Amino acid sequence: MDWEMTHLDEVDLIMLYLHPGTISPVSLLELGRYSRSGRLIVCCPKGYHRRGNVQYLFRKDSVPLFEEFDKFVKARNKRLEDITRENLPLEGSIKIRVSKRTLLPGLLR
């Protein structure tokens, strides 16, 4: 857990997918920790057991929240384009980390 939190502190984009039928306690911890970072986007489909709590947090902290996976992927693509454009003149690399829990078929198209 220490390794994961250290790396999440260093990335430009954090994506969480809260799958219905899962409890996702670590994802909820990450959601609370990074909701005000400006680096978080979340997909929380209908059926997720804490959807109301997630919606409340996102209204409060103005974090992009998506119900539909396709819109989540489009938002991810846009953010990556923005991050790339912002970082092109800079030396170094862009650090993007997607948690293993968020890797779903088609996510990294």
Image: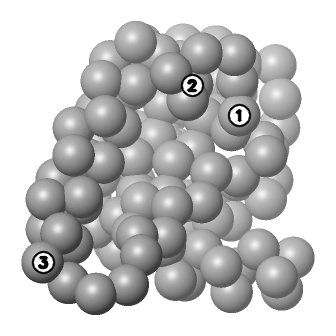
Residue 29 can be seen in this image:
yes
Q: Earlier in the sequence, mark 3 or mark 1?
A: 3
The label on residue 103 is 1
Q: Which mark is residue 89?
A: 3
Of callouts 3 and 2, the N-terminal one: 3
State the residue at coordinates (30%, 48%).
80
Residue 94 is marked as none
The three-letter amino acid code for the residue at tag 2 is Leu
Q: Position of residue 33 (x, y in %)?
A: 55, 74
Q: Secondary structure at mark 1?
A: loop
State whether residue 93 is above or below residue 79: below
Residue linked to disc 2: 107
Q: How many marks?
A: 3
Distance from Cα at disc 1 to Cα at disc 2: 6 Å
- Label 3: which secondary element: loop
**Amino acid type of the residue tagged 3 in the rendering:** Pro
Viewer-proximal residue among 97 and 31: 97
Residue at x 21% of width, y 72% of height: 87
Kindly indicate whether the residue at mark 2 contacts the one at mark 1 (C-beta within 8 angstroms): yes
Front one among 80 and 61: 80
